[in-house]
Image (cartoon, helix red, strand yellow):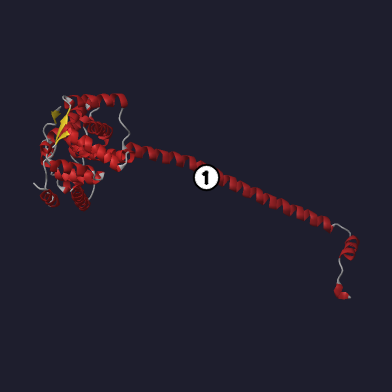
Protein backbone atom coordinates (compact mmCIF):
# COMPACT_ATOMS: atom_id res chain seq x y z
CA UNK A 1 0.00 0.00 0.00
CA UNK A 2 1.36 3.41 -0.92
CA UNK A 3 1.07 6.54 1.17
CA UNK A 4 -1.65 7.94 -1.07
CA UNK A 5 -3.60 4.69 -0.89
CA UNK A 6 -3.41 4.71 2.88
CA UNK A 7 -4.65 8.31 3.02
CA UNK A 8 -7.53 7.45 0.70
CA UNK A 9 -8.28 4.39 2.86
CA UNK A 10 -8.41 6.57 5.98
CA UNK A 11 -10.64 9.14 4.29
CA UNK A 12 -13.07 6.37 3.39
CA UNK A 13 -13.16 5.34 7.07
CA UNK A 14 -11.33 2.13 6.35
CA UNK A 15 -9.88 0.09 9.16
CA UNK A 16 -6.43 -1.27 9.80
CA UNK A 17 -4.67 -4.02 11.61
CA UNK A 18 -4.30 -3.29 15.31
CA UNK A 19 -0.69 -3.29 16.48
CA UNK A 20 0.56 -6.28 18.44
CA UNK A 21 1.85 -5.06 21.73
CA UNK A 22 4.49 -6.79 23.77
CA UNK A 23 3.89 -7.12 27.50
CA UNK A 24 6.19 -8.52 30.19
CA UNK A 25 5.80 -12.24 30.81
CA UNK A 26 3.08 -13.02 33.34
CA UNK A 27 1.77 -9.44 33.31
CA UNK A 28 -1.90 -10.39 32.92
CA UNK A 29 -1.57 -13.20 35.47
CA UNK A 30 -0.31 -10.79 38.10
CA UNK A 31 -2.38 -7.70 37.34
CA UNK A 32 -5.60 -8.74 39.16
CA UNK A 33 -3.75 -9.41 42.42
CA UNK A 34 -1.76 -6.17 42.02
CA UNK A 35 -4.99 -4.21 41.57
CA UNK A 36 -6.59 -5.87 44.60
CA UNK A 37 -3.46 -5.19 46.67
CA UNK A 38 -3.63 -1.51 45.69
CA UNK A 39 -7.29 -1.37 46.65
CA UNK A 40 -6.48 -2.94 50.01
CA UNK A 41 -3.64 -0.55 50.79
CA UNK A 42 -4.73 2.72 49.17
CA UNK A 43 -8.48 2.32 49.31
CA UNK A 44 -10.72 3.52 46.54
CA UNK A 45 -10.15 6.96 45.06
CA UNK A 46 -12.99 9.43 45.51
CA UNK A 47 -15.40 9.02 42.67
CA UNK A 48 -17.07 11.98 40.95
CA UNK A 49 -20.31 11.01 42.64
CA UNK A 50 -18.77 11.20 46.08
CA UNK A 51 -17.13 14.50 45.14
CA UNK A 52 -20.51 15.80 44.11
CA UNK A 53 -22.00 14.60 47.38
CA UNK A 54 -19.15 16.28 49.25
CA UNK A 55 -19.81 19.57 47.50
CA UNK A 56 -23.51 19.26 48.38
CA UNK A 57 -22.53 18.66 51.98
CA UNK A 58 -20.40 21.78 51.88
CA UNK A 59 -23.28 23.75 50.39
CA UNK A 60 -25.63 22.57 53.15
CA UNK A 61 -23.04 23.40 55.81
CA UNK A 62 -22.56 26.86 54.31
CA UNK A 63 -26.34 27.36 54.29
CA UNK A 64 -26.53 26.26 57.93
CA UNK A 65 -23.92 28.84 58.84
CA UNK A 66 -25.38 31.54 56.62
CA UNK A 67 -28.92 31.33 58.02
CA UNK A 68 -28.02 32.13 61.67
CA UNK A 69 -25.63 34.81 60.42
CA UNK A 70 -28.37 36.44 58.36
CA UNK A 71 -30.84 36.19 61.24
CA UNK A 72 -28.23 37.77 63.51
CA UNK A 73 -27.76 40.69 61.13
CA UNK A 74 -31.53 41.22 60.87
CA UNK A 75 -31.90 41.12 64.64
CA UNK A 76 -29.04 43.56 65.04
CA UNK A 77 -30.57 45.87 62.47
CA UNK A 78 -34.01 45.75 64.08
CA UNK A 79 -32.45 46.35 67.45
CA UNK A 80 -30.54 49.36 66.12
CA UNK A 81 -33.76 50.66 64.64
CA UNK A 82 -35.48 50.26 68.02
CA UNK A 83 -32.67 52.17 69.68
CA UNK A 84 -32.98 54.91 67.10
CA UNK A 85 -36.71 55.16 67.64
CA UNK A 86 -36.15 55.26 71.36
CA UNK A 87 -33.59 58.01 70.86
CA UNK A 88 -36.07 59.91 68.77
CA UNK A 89 -38.62 59.39 71.47
CA UNK A 90 -36.14 60.67 74.04
CA UNK A 91 -35.39 63.68 71.89
CA UNK A 92 -39.07 64.50 71.63
CA UNK A 93 -39.38 64.30 75.35
CA UNK A 94 -36.45 66.67 75.79
CA UNK A 95 -37.91 69.08 73.32
CA UNK A 96 -41.18 68.85 75.15
CA UNK A 97 -39.51 69.53 78.46
CA UNK A 98 -37.59 72.41 76.94
CA UNK A 99 -40.78 73.84 75.57
CA UNK A 100 -42.39 73.44 78.94
CA UNK A 101 -39.46 75.25 80.51
CA UNK A 102 -39.74 78.05 77.95
CA UNK A 103 -43.45 78.27 78.67
CA UNK A 104 -42.70 78.82 82.32
CA UNK A 105 -40.44 81.84 81.72
CA UNK A 106 -41.82 85.21 82.60
CA UNK A 107 -43.05 87.27 79.60
CA UNK A 108 -40.97 90.32 80.56
CA UNK A 109 -37.79 88.24 80.32
CA UNK A 110 -38.74 87.11 76.84
CA UNK A 111 -39.62 90.63 75.78
CA UNK A 112 -36.27 91.97 76.98
CA UNK A 113 -34.51 89.17 75.11
CA UNK A 114 -36.33 90.01 71.89
CA UNK A 115 -35.64 93.76 72.17
CA UNK A 116 -31.99 93.09 72.70
CA UNK A 117 -31.53 90.57 69.88
CA UNK A 118 -34.17 91.24 67.30
CA UNK A 119 -34.52 94.46 65.24
CA UNK A 120 -37.38 94.83 62.79
CA UNK A 121 -36.18 97.39 60.20
CA UNK A 122 -39.54 97.57 58.49
CA UNK A 123 -40.87 99.83 61.22
CA UNK A 124 -38.22 102.50 60.52
CA UNK B 1 8.14 -10.33 26.54
CA UNK B 2 4.98 -11.88 25.17
CA UNK B 3 2.43 -10.44 22.78
CA UNK B 4 -0.87 -9.32 24.25
CA UNK B 5 -3.23 -12.18 23.65
CA UNK B 6 -6.68 -12.36 22.25
CA UNK B 7 -8.66 -9.33 21.31
CA UNK B 8 -7.80 -7.65 18.05
CA UNK B 9 -9.93 -4.63 18.69
CA UNK B 10 -13.15 -5.66 16.98
CA UNK B 11 -16.17 -4.15 18.80
CA UNK B 12 -18.32 -7.15 17.99
CA UNK B 13 -15.73 -9.32 19.72
CA UNK B 14 -15.72 -6.92 22.62
CA UNK B 15 -19.40 -7.37 23.28
CA UNK B 16 -19.93 -10.97 22.24
CA UNK B 17 -16.93 -12.36 24.07
CA UNK B 18 -18.55 -11.26 27.29
CA UNK B 19 -21.71 -13.21 27.92
CA UNK B 20 -24.55 -11.05 29.12
CA UNK B 21 -25.56 -13.70 31.65
CA UNK B 22 -22.11 -13.86 33.21
CA UNK B 23 -22.10 -10.05 33.35
CA UNK B 24 -25.40 -10.14 35.24
CA UNK B 25 -24.13 -12.77 37.64
CA UNK B 26 -20.96 -10.82 38.20
CA UNK B 27 -22.88 -7.62 38.92
CA UNK B 28 -25.04 -9.47 41.45
CA UNK B 29 -21.90 -10.74 43.18
CA UNK B 30 -20.38 -7.24 43.09
CA UNK B 31 -23.46 -5.95 44.91
CA UNK B 32 -22.94 -8.52 47.68
CA UNK B 33 -20.37 -7.12 50.12
CA UNK B 34 -19.17 -10.60 51.05
CA UNK B 35 -18.39 -11.53 47.47
CA UNK B 36 -17.45 -8.08 46.20
CA UNK B 37 -13.65 -8.43 46.29
CA UNK B 38 -13.57 -11.83 44.64
CA UNK B 39 -16.07 -10.72 41.99
CA UNK B 40 -14.09 -7.59 41.26
CA UNK B 41 -10.89 -9.58 40.84
CA UNK B 42 -12.77 -11.72 38.33
CA UNK B 43 -13.96 -8.57 36.55
CA UNK B 44 -10.35 -7.39 36.27
CA UNK B 45 -9.35 -10.77 34.85
CA UNK B 46 -12.18 -10.66 32.32
CA UNK B 47 -11.54 -7.19 30.93
CA UNK B 48 -7.86 -6.48 31.54
CA UNK B 49 -6.53 -7.48 28.11
CA UNK B 50 -9.21 -5.67 26.10
CA UNK B 51 -8.83 -2.52 28.14
CA UNK B 52 -5.05 -2.80 27.97
CA UNK B 53 -5.09 -2.77 24.15
CA UNK B 54 -7.42 0.26 24.09
CA UNK B 55 -5.26 2.15 26.58
CA UNK B 56 -2.00 1.14 24.92
CA UNK B 57 -3.32 2.43 21.58
CA UNK B 58 -3.70 5.77 23.29
CA UNK B 59 -0.68 6.12 25.57
CA UNK B 60 1.97 4.20 23.64
CA UNK B 61 4.24 2.60 26.21
CA UNK B 62 3.65 -0.42 28.42
CA UNK B 63 4.60 1.46 31.58
CA UNK B 64 2.05 4.21 30.94
CA UNK B 65 -0.59 1.71 29.84
CA UNK B 66 -0.03 -0.23 33.07
CA UNK B 67 -0.49 2.92 35.18
CA UNK B 68 -3.63 3.99 33.33
CA UNK B 69 -5.10 0.47 33.41
CA UNK B 70 -4.59 0.17 37.16
CA UNK B 71 -6.12 3.62 37.69
CA UNK B 72 -9.06 2.56 35.53
CA UNK B 73 -9.75 -0.42 37.79
CA UNK B 74 -9.30 1.71 40.90
CA UNK B 75 -11.92 4.13 39.59
CA UNK B 76 -14.17 1.23 38.68
CA UNK B 77 -13.90 -0.14 42.21
CA UNK B 78 -14.77 3.29 43.61
CA UNK B 79 -17.79 3.63 41.36
CA UNK B 80 -19.08 0.07 41.20
CA UNK B 81 -21.76 0.69 43.84
CA UNK B 82 -23.17 3.54 41.78
CA UNK B 83 -23.12 1.57 38.51
CA UNK B 84 -26.77 1.70 37.46
CA UNK B 85 -26.61 -0.92 34.67
CA UNK B 86 -27.79 1.62 32.10
CA UNK B 87 -25.03 0.27 29.88
CA UNK B 88 -23.15 -3.00 29.78
CA UNK B 89 -20.42 -3.26 32.35
CA UNK B 90 -17.85 -3.57 29.53
CA UNK B 91 -19.01 -0.28 28.02
CA UNK B 92 -18.85 1.33 31.44
CA UNK B 93 -15.28 0.10 31.99
CA UNK B 94 -14.35 1.19 28.50
CA UNK B 95 -15.69 4.68 29.26
CA UNK B 96 -13.58 4.92 32.43
CA UNK B 97 -10.52 3.72 30.49
CA UNK B 98 -11.15 6.29 27.74
CA UNK B 99 -11.47 9.11 30.26
CA UNK B 100 -8.37 7.98 32.13
CA UNK B 101 -6.35 7.78 28.89
CA UNK B 102 -7.42 11.26 27.80
CA UNK B 103 -6.74 12.63 31.27
CA UNK B 104 -3.29 10.99 31.29
CA UNK B 105 -2.36 12.43 27.90
CA UNK B 106 -3.68 15.88 28.81
CA UNK B 107 -1.56 15.96 31.98
CA UNK B 108 1.42 14.68 30.07
CA UNK B 109 1.04 17.43 27.49
CA UNK B 110 0.94 19.99 30.24
CA UNK B 111 4.15 18.64 31.72
CA UNK B 112 6.15 18.35 28.52
CA UNK B 113 6.12 20.66 25.53
CA UNK B 114 4.30 19.26 22.51
CA UNK B 115 7.37 18.64 20.38
CA UNK B 116 9.38 17.08 23.16
CA UNK B 117 6.47 14.88 24.16
CA UNK B 118 5.81 13.73 20.63
CA UNK B 119 9.40 12.74 20.04
CA UNK B 120 9.51 11.09 23.47
CA UNK B 121 6.37 9.07 22.79
CA UNK B 122 7.43 8.20 19.28
CA UNK B 123 10.80 6.89 20.36
CA UNK B 124 9.29 4.74 23.08
CA UNK B 125 6.31 3.66 21.03
CA UNK B 126 8.27 2.61 18.00
CA UNK B 127 10.97 0.91 20.01
CA UNK B 128 8.43 -0.91 22.15
CA UNK B 129 6.00 -2.02 19.49
CA UNK B 130 6.32 -4.67 16.87
CA UNK B 131 4.12 -2.98 14.26
CA UNK B 132 3.47 -4.78 10.99
CA UNK B 133 7.00 -6.19 11.06
CA UNK B 134 8.39 -2.65 11.11
CA UNK B 135 6.84 -1.62 7.78
CA UNK B 136 7.69 2.00 7.17
CA UNK B 137 4.19 3.15 6.35
CA UNK B 138 2.68 1.65 9.49
CA UNK B 139 5.43 3.14 11.62
CA UNK B 140 4.74 6.50 10.02
CA UNK B 141 1.04 6.12 10.74
CA UNK B 142 1.77 5.42 14.42
CA UNK B 143 4.00 8.49 14.49
CA UNK B 144 1.21 10.56 12.95
CA UNK B 145 -1.33 9.20 15.48
CA UNK B 146 1.01 10.19 18.31
CA UNK B 147 0.85 13.82 17.20
CA UNK B 148 -2.97 13.95 17.42
CA UNK B 149 -4.70 15.67 20.34
CA UNK B 150 -5.94 13.14 22.94
CA UNK B 151 -9.63 13.11 21.95
CA UNK B 152 -8.91 12.84 18.23
CA UNK B 153 -6.43 10.08 18.96
CA UNK B 154 -9.08 8.26 20.95
CA UNK B 155 -11.66 8.49 18.20
CA UNK B 156 -9.20 7.56 15.47
CA UNK B 157 -7.82 4.48 17.24
CA UNK B 158 -11.31 3.27 18.15
CA UNK B 159 -12.42 3.64 14.54
CA UNK B 160 -9.32 2.49 12.73
CA UNK B 161 -7.83 -0.22 14.93
CA UNK B 162 -10.90 -1.39 16.81
CA UNK B 163 -13.41 -1.02 13.98
CA UNK B 164 -15.89 0.53 16.34
CA UNK B 165 -19.10 2.06 15.03
CA UNK B 166 -19.77 5.70 15.78
CA UNK B 167 -22.88 4.74 17.78
CA UNK B 168 -20.79 2.50 20.05
CA UNK B 169 -18.19 5.20 20.45
CA UNK B 170 -20.95 7.65 21.28
CA UNK B 171 -22.11 5.37 24.14
CA UNK B 172 -18.61 5.08 25.50
CA UNK B 173 -17.37 8.64 25.05
CA UNK B 174 -20.68 10.43 25.64
CA UNK B 175 -20.20 12.49 22.47
CA UNK B 176 -22.65 12.89 19.59
CA UNK B 177 -22.16 10.83 16.43
CA UNK B 178 -21.79 14.03 14.38
CA UNK B 179 -19.04 15.34 16.64
CA UNK B 180 -17.24 11.99 16.50
CA UNK B 181 -17.35 11.94 12.69
CA UNK B 182 -15.97 15.47 12.61
CA UNK B 183 -13.26 14.48 15.07
CA UNK B 184 -12.29 11.45 12.95
CA UNK B 185 -12.02 13.52 9.77
CA UNK B 186 -9.99 16.22 11.54
CA UNK B 187 -7.65 13.45 12.66
CA UNK B 188 -7.35 12.13 9.10
CA UNK B 189 -6.53 15.61 7.83
CA UNK B 190 -3.79 15.97 10.44
CA UNK B 191 -2.38 12.56 9.55
CA UNK B 192 -2.42 13.53 5.86
CA UNK B 193 -0.55 16.75 6.65
CA UNK B 194 1.96 14.79 8.72
CA UNK B 195 2.56 12.45 5.77
CA UNK B 196 3.06 15.40 3.42
CA UNK B 197 5.51 17.02 5.81
CA UNK B 198 7.45 13.78 6.06
CA UNK B 199 7.79 13.60 2.29
Nearest the camera: B66 or A75? B66
Query: Label 1: chain?
Result: A
Residue A63 is drawn in which quadrant?
Answer: top left
Give the left or right position of residue B118, taking residue B11 as reference.
right
Nearest the camera: A37 or B53? B53
- Estimate how packed mark 1 is, as few (under 14), some (14 to 19) or many (20 or more) residues with alpha carbons within 10 Å: few
Give the left or right position of residue A103, taking residue B12 as reference.
right
**Residue furthest toward the front?**
B199
Q: Quadrant of the N terminus of chain B?
A: top left
Residue to which mark 1 is pinned? A70
Q: Residue at x 31, y 26 (%)?
A: A42
Nearest the camera: A35 or B24? A35
The answer to whether residue B162 is seen in the rendering is no
**How far from the left and from the top, in percent, is residue B44?**
19, 30
**How far from the left and from the top, in percent, is residue A93?**
74, 53
Q: Residue at x 46, y 40 (%)?
A: A64
Residue A45 is drawn in which quadrant?
Answer: top left
The answer to whether residue A99 is seen in the rendering is yes
> Callout 1: helix, strand or loop?
helix
**How far from the left and from the top, in percent, is residue A69?**
52, 42
**How far from the left and from the top, in percent, is residue B137?**
13, 43
Q: Residue at x 76, y 55 (%)?
A: A95
What count of labels does the image hold? 1
Relative vertical location of residue A116 with respect to residue A3 in this rendering, above or below:
below
Nearest the camera: B77 or B154? B154
Amino acid sequence: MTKEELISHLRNEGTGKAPHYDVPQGYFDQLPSRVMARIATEGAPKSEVSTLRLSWTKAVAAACLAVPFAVGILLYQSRTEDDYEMALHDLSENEYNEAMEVAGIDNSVIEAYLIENYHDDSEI
Amino acid sequence: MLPAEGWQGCPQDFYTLTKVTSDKELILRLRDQKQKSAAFEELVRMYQERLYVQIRNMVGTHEDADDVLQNTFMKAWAGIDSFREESQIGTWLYRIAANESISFLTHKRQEISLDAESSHLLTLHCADTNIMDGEELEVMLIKAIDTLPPKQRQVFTMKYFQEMKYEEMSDILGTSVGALKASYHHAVEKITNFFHLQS
